[in-house]
Amino acid sequence: MTPPPTADRSSMRRRSDVDAKPVHSLSHDILCIIFSFLDLFDLVRCLAVCKSWNYAIYKSEILRTFCLRYQKQEMNSASTSEVSFSLEKPLLECLEEIAMERHKLALEKGRIRVSQWIGHSVRAEQCRMKMGLILTGVGDKVMRLWSPENFRCLEEYSIPEKVPLIDFDFDVGKIVGLVGKQLCIWSRSGKRSIFPSRECTFEKGLCMRYFDAEAVVGCEDGTAHVFDMYSRRCSRIIRMLPGPVTCLCVNDDQLMFGGSLLGNIGVSGLRSDQRVVMLRSRNTVGIRTLCYNDSSRLVFAGSTAGHVYCWDLRTMKSLWESRVSPNVIYSLQHLQNDRSSLAVGGIDGILRILDQNTGTVRSCCMMDSRLLSTHQNGLGTVEERRGKRLSDETPIDAIDRRNRPSITSLAVGMKKIVTTHNDKFIRLWKFQS
């Protein structure tokens, strides 16, 4: 077919421009009609697009209508006494409760899709997920920041030569890493700076956590060294444990928790210079990983013998302990503000979802070996597979190790979990409610 003359094509463009109204010119009523077809998570995303959308959603009370509809569905599917959701609470609190409930149901019962891709040339041992981004590293001389939507590498950060990357963390503006005996900071633009060697007063750092302008390094001699990110100086040295500090976590109240392979957990304030209290239980053995829930004030720990422990920080007493695996627990995490689900991974390669309040295993997951599809992410091939849930009677030792590589680290997002496995691959588990 002969293409139309230039004049005709330009007139077509003008007509197209006239016909296609910009979104901001849509009337309030039309926007409300469009928004009424959206799901909760889409509505919350729309709130952040612009002021006019935010105003339209709040003014029309679409969110409150959604909450009422959700409450009605809950009451139809359960007895009134079982429904804890209430519209007497502030709207945002109600929305958060709905989101957390959907997250819980997706992790425990939803369909699973696993995306797997080669992220590093040697191996990826650790991962972090924040603000909708994934950071991976340890093994080769680079950390990579990924998009969980299209699995593309967004940014890359080089590690100084001849020193190992031990641990790392990040926020919206920077990446902080424990590299050999020093701390490094990478800006999101890629510029790297290293703390002066005279300030790094530890002989051997084993773990690190970063929290709002301060980095804490857990050391082999049982101390924790606190560094100020602005002055780049070691501000405090805290005697945490009688043995090496193998894992750390820091909470919003600037309390610090340090675990040891001796089975102890020390608790201290970042402004203190000594341990405040020690958490113990009768059967506590080597602590390999820690996390803390600011919402419920619960401390969780995973051990070298497959146990998961829980303490209530308000009473300093053990709530429960459960042996969920026959082998080492390498990592456990939960979504921020979620009081229900705890994701646990370890040497047996099974991703477990636990009830935070009882320690009961709600679900055991692994990746199906059958390939669904493949696509490219710029660095290589992304493989799509289904995840499957195992029954209580499934003999895990009979499952091929190639289908369940050890989970060395995991991080939890809304209805998704990212895992690394001490190999080249990164896996993103998406749970559909």
Image (cartoon, rainbow, N blue to C red):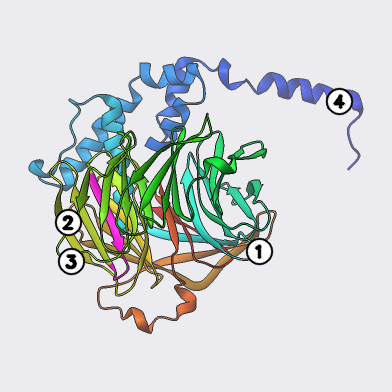
Residue 305 colored in magenta in the image: yes
| Percent of width and height locating residue 103 | 33, 47
Q: Which residue is mark 2?
A: 358
- Residue at which label 3 appears: 283
Foreground mark, 3 or 1, reads: 3
User: Is residue 2 visible from the viewing direction of this image?
Assistant: yes
Looking at the rendering, the stretch of residues picked out in magenta corresponds to: 298-306
Callout 2 amino acid: Thr
Q: Earlier in the sequence, mark 2 or mark 4?
A: 4
- Earlier residue among tags 3 and 4: 4
Indicate which disc, 1 or 4, sits on the residue closer to the N terminus: 4
Identify the mark nearer the N-term, 3 or 1.
Answer: 1
**Cα distance in 3D space between marks 3 and 1:** 40 Å
In depth, the one of 150 and 342 nearer the eye is: 342
- Specify the quadrant that holds the N terminus: top right
Q: Amino acid at mark 4?
A: Asp
- Pointer 3: residues within 10 angstroms few (<14), some, or many (20+)? few
Q: CA distance from mark 1 to mark 2?
A: 40 Å
Instruction: Residue lying at the far left in this picture: please name it.
Output: 81
Amino acid type at circle 3 is: Asn
The image quadrant of residue 35 is top left
